[in-house]
Amino acid sequence: MIRKLLIANRGEIALRILRACRELGIATVAVYSEADRTSLHVRFADEAYPIGPPPARESYLKVPALLEVARRSGADALHPGYGFLAENADFAEACLAAGLTFVGPSPAAIRAMGDKIQARRLAQQAGLPLVPGTLDEVADIGSALATAEAIGFPVLLKASGGGGGRGIRLVTQAEDMAAAFSSATSEAAAGFGHGGVYLEKYLAPIRHVEVQVMADRFGRVVALGERECSIQRRHQKIIEEAPSPAVSPALRSRLMEMAAAVARAVQYEGAGTVEFLLDGEGQAYFMEMNTRLQVEHPVTEMVTGTDLVADQLLVASGEPLGYTQDDVQLRGWAIECRITSEDPYHDFVPSVGVVRLFHEPGGPGIRVDTGLYDHMEVTVYYDPLLAKLIAWGRDREQAMQRMRRALREVHITGIHTNIPFHLYVLESPEFQQGQVDTGFAERALRAWQRQEGEQVDVALLAAALVAYHERRTGTERPGGAPGGAHRGRCVNPWTLTYRPGPTAWTRR
Ligand code: ADP
Ligand code: ADP
Ligand code: MG
């Protein structure tokens, strides 16, 4: 059994892994960049070591620094979390060479699935339908054009080593190929160290549905149902749920069988996710496999009653998985909203600064996975994910009710978040009916921006009228600050939000 685990990550996922370790009696070692010295994962770990300056490539991506901490601390295993080095086969290999247990699949499995083209080949051999497209990289603009004509526009150019929604370009007509090809290849070269791209038919409207798998080293592969991840912006997930409103029990069994077949094809071990595109006729196409814990794993945990991180740690320790496919039963419905430090009123520009106040929601069915705390500084260095808000209900209706309620309970001041957009989506009839596709969020965003624009006009008009009235009646305030009735007092803005007018909370 693992005794001491090095967590090679930060933020909410580092805390999530720490918590599983605490429950299993595994000692924890945190690492942190100079920007994260006061982070919760640093405070909660048994030991913590600095590994370098804020930029990830000088800290969280620095393999020698991580291995040195493992040696100094006496850790016997390493969990990579998601992002950073989680899908880096060379890193997994380096861990094994240093005598560490790597909490994840074998370097060979990571390598096979990290290359999207090789993954497509493997999936095809395992009998899965692929998204129509190439099984080789396209060498240059000329062959990309010829292939696209053969497949038929629109097509997607995809980086074979890509991930995180990057290195993907939509090409709707031949004239746009040259520009798309060079920007995709350069983004891929910069982001993934390899500029190779291939082509897929662009399917639309389409859903993103994925299957969670868990496998042990004794050949047991269990599929834990699907997640619906169609609410995306720029190919990145914003809201996920389990199960999918578009998946019937028969389709679910088929998807789970296909996912397990892919996992078996690479002798998979640990937690992994097989992603599919699902069309309106219930036809599923293999898209890719992520060889790691997924950001949205909590929705699966909520409906299956599993602890995927604990399972990862057990399986990595060489234990057999404690349940079989027949034990898997779905109960209720779970939805996750990714709360990010992005300003939805200004095209989701990253919002940085000090979080002055964070109030966490609670109550029945609510789970919050976050590394956020009062006075935390949000910087430009890392992913904008601040918190994952997860709501469970006996059915989809109740999960949505709880999510809407919990989103309104959150208070994060000092920086902007995407919560207003989450509320807009949760309130939209299409989402409520489960009628979504991967283009839904961007359409909703445009509609929302139009609506907000109109409301800003109304607000400006109202403010102008008030100013006019005050000048006429001689009641204007110095500096034009709002709240004439509170003049001279400092009102707690948190209270004001909910209780218009003076209250017992006001201070002189
Ligand atoms: P999930 O399906 O778990 O949400 P994402 O694709 O959103 O996965 O990726 C999770 C995290 O990992 C994000 O921070 C993303 O930026 C990062 N990520 C994913 N793939 C890569 C990659 N190949 N290289 C670098 N970062 C990646
Ligand atoms: P990443 O490794 O960055 O996660 P994926 O291959 O999983 O890349 O694709 C990311 C997203 O892009 C998908 O969730 C889906 O919304 C969209 N997408 C990918 N391939 C296609 C396709 N062939 N047709 C339509 N949409 C696609
Ligand atoms: Mg993907």
Image (cartoon, rainbow, N blue to C red):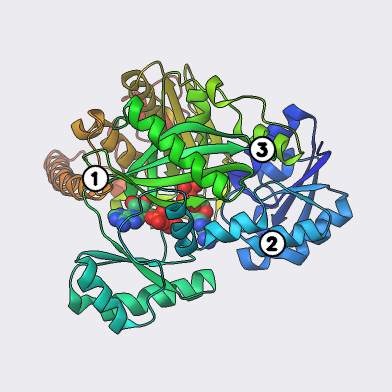
Give the residue at x 20% y 45%.
452
> Residue 473's image quarter?
top left
Badge 2 residue CB within 8 Å of ligand 1 = no
- Comparing 267 with 364, the one in front is 267
Give the residue at x 70% y 57%.
92
Instruction: Work out how far the residue at label 1 is from the one at label 2, CA to CA, in angstroms.
Output: 37 Å
Camera-side mark, 3 or 1: 3
Q: How many marks?
A: 3
Amino acid residing under circle 3: Asp
Camera-side mark, 1 or 2: 2
Which of marks 1 and 3 precedes in the sequence? 3
The secondary element bearing badge 3 is classed as loop
The secondary element bearing badge 2 is classed as helix
Please name the residue that numbered disc 1 is placed on: 440
Please name the residue that numbered disc 3 is placed on: 216
Side of 168 where 119 appears, left or right: right
